[in-house]
Image (tube, rainbow, N blue to C red):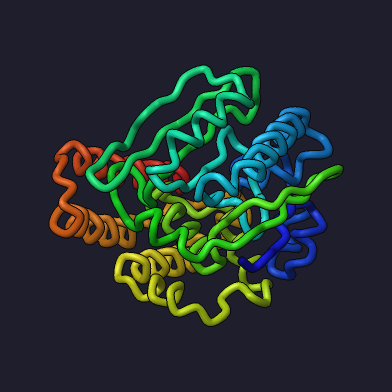
Amino acid sequence: MNRLIVGILATKSLASIPALRAIIPKLTKQLAEKGNINTILIEVDETVKEKLNDLERIISFLSEVESEVEFAILKMQPIITHLGNDIDVLIRPKDVKHFLQRFEKMFRIHHIELHENIRRGFKATIHLSDMKLNQVELYTYLGWYGYFFISSDELLKSRQTAVFAFDNASFSVPVLSNTHAFIVDILHAVFGNRFISLGDLVKLLSYLYLETSFADNAEGNSFLNRREIVMAINCFVKSLRICLTDVLSSGRCYIPLRYLLHYSIISSLENFFINKELSLDVYWKELRRILNTEWRRLAKSV
């Protein structure tokens, strides 16, 4: 597996990207939080410091079990921009039981929540006690809100090793290939969040700055040719053209309805007829999510 270094976003990282230098003078805690780039606050915000310490503990554990179970960390490459309440781990369904057995020996688990249980996979949230970064999300497929996009088997075929560097230690942990990680970030922004954040922009530009980001990889390139992924990338790019000013000034921008609705309809039809996920509750929730996203976007523009 190829090796890369995953670091923490800092102000100097922003300064190294010409397109983002202009926002440095107006960086505030509110902008950092809303833009999903709160890791730049590590030196001044105690909560973010505590979350970084918790992240180091979890990463240390993952480095210990990587030879026992097949998994990859999601949404933390090529640079960690945001420390929220959770860390996302893509894992094969057959490895979940052993992973949980090892995990509960190292951490105090408050409870485990099974959710998004669909025909082709499930997600589970491990809720932790006495930690600021207090959730580990286990994905056995790539998708959100009952929508299936890609299986863990497909994604984990081309893992690579990343070195997560902290102040006093570093750990080798599996992550997705750069191509697949890029796809996950785009799908998460378009379908998971329904908005583009400053953190998304930082990651996109960071991928472009990596010399080996999209090296020839037939398997990865075949993913880029899938219809739903091509549509997600087009939706992201078209939205960014409209949203760029808001992203740079206020930290995020909700995707316009004219792009979101088209993508959502196609995804719903594929999920219904191809993936055979026939829960009407999923599609009713999807309609409400679309309307909620549009309301938020309009409220921002008033």
Question: x, y (%) of residue 273?
Answer: 13, 57
Residue at position x 64%, y 18% in the image: 130
- Quarter of the image holding residue 213? bottom right
Query: From this viewpoint, which residue is outermost toward the bottom?
Result: 216
Residue at position x 32%, y 37% in the image: 116
Question: x, y (%) of residue 219?
Answer: 43, 74
Question: x, y (%) of residue 75?
Answer: 55, 51
**Residue 202 visible in the displayed image:** no
Q: How many marks?
A: 0
Q: Left or right? Give the position of 230 relative to 98.
A: left
Query: From this viewpoint, which residue is outermost toward the right?
Result: 168
Q: Left or right? Give the position of 247 relative to 97.
A: right
Q: Quadrant of the N terminus?
A: bottom right
- Quarter of the image holding residue 232? bottom left
Q: Quadrant of the C terminus?
A: top left
**Residue 175 visible in the displayed image:** yes
Out of 151 and 30, give the one closest to the viewer.
151
Out of 177 and 181, give the one closest to the viewer.
177
Out of 301 and 157, give the one closest to the viewer.
157
Residue at position x 53%, y 34% in the image: 136
Question: x, y (%) of residue 264?
Answer: 27, 55
Residue at position x 44%, y 64% in the image: 236
Q: Is residue 175 above or below residue 284?
A: below
